[in-house]
Image (spheres, rainbow, N blue to C red):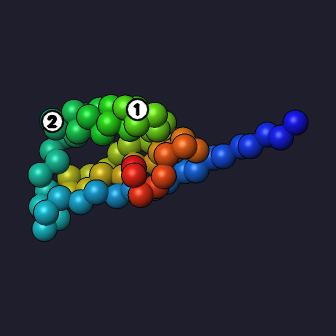
Amino acid sequence: MVHTFTSLLTHVVFSTSGRAPLLTDAVQPDVHAYLGGILREIRAFPVAIGGTRDHVHLLTRLPAELAVSDC
């Protein structure tokens, strides 16, 4: 019996335009939740989401059937 195991962890960084400090403490939880929802819709697993006022880091596990370019 053949088994395949895939564990593709991907680190993605998004930055605001011109690295402007637009992601205040008040909006960061909403932005992180929104990004997590997008990942769950494509059946990816958000391992960690965080960042600062000018960028967001995503660590996500992508499913085997999803191409990185499609994500």
Give neighbour class at mark 1: few <14, some 14-19, many 20+ (Cα, 10 Å).
some
Q: Quadrant of residue 35?
A: top left
Q: Amino acid at mark 1?
A: Arg
Label ID, residue 58: none
Figure quadrant of residue 15? bottom left
Q: Is residue 17 left or right of residue 36?
A: left
Check whether the beta carbons of the residues at disc 1 and disc 2 lie within 8 A of each other: no
Q: Nearer the viewer, residue 18 or 38?
A: 38
Which kind of residue does numbered mark 2 sit on? Ala
Q: Residue at x 13, y 68 (%)?
A: 18
Quadrant of the snapshot with the N terminus: top right
Spatial distance from mark 1 to mark 2, Cα to Cα?
23 Å
Question: Dot 2: within a 10 Å radius of its alpha carbon, few (fewer than 14), some, or many (20 or more) residues?
Answer: few
In this image, 15 relative to 10: left or right?
left
Considering only order in the chain, which callout, 2 or 1, is on the residue closer to the N terminus?
2
Q: Nearer the viewer, mark 1 or mark 2?
A: 1
Which of these two is toward me, 22 or 4? 4
Whether residue 10 appears in this view of the structure is yes
Left or right of 5, for residue 35: left
Task: Say the numbered circle drawn on residue 26.
Answer: 2
Location of residue 38 in the rendering, given as x and y in whole percent from the top left corner: 32, 36
User: Regarding mark 2 in the picture, which secondary structure is present there?
Assistant: loop
Q: Is residue 51 left or right of residue 45?
A: left
- Residue farthest to the bottom, as pictured: 18
Give the total number of marks visible in the rendering: 2
Q: Which mark is residue 40?
A: 1
Q: Position of residue 22 (x, y in %)?
A: 12, 52
Q: Nearer the viewer, residue 8 or 32?
A: 8
Residue at figure coordinates x 38%, y 43% from the top left: 49
Tell me where residue 9 appears, x and y as whole percent: 55, 50
The residue that appears at 46% across and 48% down in the rendered structure is 59
At horizontal 40% and vertical 36% (from top left) the residue drawn is: 42
